[in-house]
Amino acid sequence: MANEDLFKKVISHAKEYGYIFASSEIYDGLSAVYDYAQNGVELKKNIREYWWRSMVFTHQNIVGIDAAILMHPKTWKASGHVDAFNDPLIDNKDSKKRYRADVLIEDYCEKLNIKAKKEITKAKKRFGESFNEEEFVTTNPRVVNYISKQKEILERMARSLEAEDLADVKLLIEELGIADPLTGSKNWTDVKQFNLMFGTKLGASAETAMDLYLRPETAQGIFVNFLNVQKTGRMKIPFGIAQTGKAFRNEIVARQFIFRMREFEQMEMQYFVKPGEEMKWYEYWKETRLKWHMSLGLGAENYRFHDHEKMAHYANAATDIEFNFPFGFKELEGIHSRTDFDLKAHEKHSGKKLQFFDHETNKNYTPYVVETSIGLDRMFLAVFSNSLKTEELEDGSSRVVLKLPSILAPIKAAVFPLVKKDGLQEIAKEIIEDLQWEYNVIYDEKDAVGRRYRRQDAVGTPFCITVDHQTKEDQTVTIRHRDTMQQERIAISEISGKIRSSISYKEWLS
Ligand code: ATP
């Protein structure tokens, strides 16, 4: 299936099977704002839990907090968001569409990347066994040209953005002949900076109201609480503080479903380390986070690191874990070495000391910070789009199946009576009443069993349990596995254990 078709299918499937709805849909929706529906809320909760356990439960030196969305406005001055949380935007004069100038340039570079990859694939086919990829990439003139051109462009963009030379960013777009992706027009305005924070007011009267911002990232709630947590939790360096919660950004271009939203959720962890040890921990967290992703089995080939050329104002090293979304490889998670920028800045703006006292040396110091920051909604999209499959079956028919990792599936099992009589419904309901304390399970008696299976396949339920006449005689049921469609007969008393063994955090996470 073409990528564009797959993406459309993902969006319509998410709606049809109760995962995601447009926000305030009866009023035609609100751009780049979405609601999670009955199954979506469960999947989202399960992803959050999977992350939380891997951070907080399995690291004795990481604790969680839940800071408020509204923070003192000085927070955002200190963090640099008031002055520097900008995206360079550019408008097309003909189509009146607005774009991020850096994204237009990055997309152009990605096309060069794809061209290079095509040459490599072609050569691989031609030379077969004897193909030496490393040699080919460094010697084939076409590939060398694509790669060096891409590097040159990204470096120039990084330099211009750093120096706030927006005229050069526009010049670059013109020199590369980048056109409006929707209309092909090259009639561009100048590039301007646009601050992404949403403003709001605190207080009743217009004169005394205080200007606030909705937080654009959760990280600052952690920095301002650094000393509170360190002291009350008697934490020793290195230690981490984890948090999940809403963040808000007035994104310029928000056209990719839940990939780029104006209200979204982040899962962040700030790891406080000794100055000088940050690169060791940066490497540790790169590896640890990639392992977490791999544990879900979405395919190693769907991830890659992208090290930053252009660093945010606070970072001395930064990489993205990119995922192969239906629209190509894009950032899923960021890992940043943030130095002591944030703690020092808050110290300066608040006048309060934010340092760690090292009992071994009897000295205070400002810790360095390595952070891991992942968008929960982006993770949702990665899992959901990767799991959606259309399969051809042996009998010539096809089925749509959402092969979610069972640990994340919203509903763990559906229980069916084969027919709506002979006391089978009652037995099925008793099974539900027993399982419901441990798992999210549902009862379904509508339509033929085959159709009920298909419905659960599309929702992503790993197990279907059918109660039939034999159940009355020997207390056994059939259990059908979503991925293999294999059925087996087991005792009612074995159902719970069967589900439990497929969703053990210990097995999935380790
Ligand atoms: P991008 O370059 O895509 O705008 P970013 O580099 O600004 O992202 P960060 O500030 O590093 O993103 O935020 C950390 C994570 O939060 C991202 O990796 C992403 O998963 C998520 N995220 C950021 N912005 C959004 C958004 N508008 N909608 C959904 N998730 C987001």
Image (cartoon, rainbow, N blue to C red):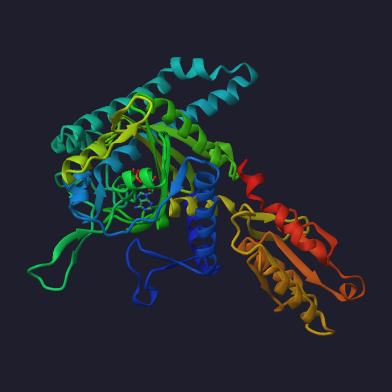
The mark tally for this picture is 0
Please state if 482 lies on the left or on the right of 229 as rendered. right
Q: Percent position (x, y) of residue 79?
A: 23, 44
Identify the residue at horizontal 36%, vertical 44% (top origin).
Answer: 231
Where does residue 82 sit, x and y in percent of width and height?
Answer: 18, 48
Q: Quadrant of the C terminus?
A: top right
- The part of the image, by quadrant, that contains residue 408 is bottom right
The residue closer to the viewer here, 329 or 208, is 208
Q: Is residue 258 above or below residue 189?
A: below
Q: Is residue 494 left or right of residue 163?
A: right
Q: Examine the rendering and report whether any part of residue 177 can be seen.
A: no
Q: Nearer the viewer, residue 48 or 299?
A: 48
**Residue 58 visible in the displayed image:** yes
Q: Is residue 387 above or below residue 207?
A: above
Q: Residue most toward the left?
A: 207
- Residue at the image point whose x is 49% and y is 68% from the top: 37
Name the one closer to the observer, 224 or 83.
224
Q: Locate residue 461: give its quadrant.
A: bottom right
Q: Position of residue 126 (x, y in %)?
A: 59, 22
Where residue 1 sits in the image (x, y, percent)? Answer: 56, 51
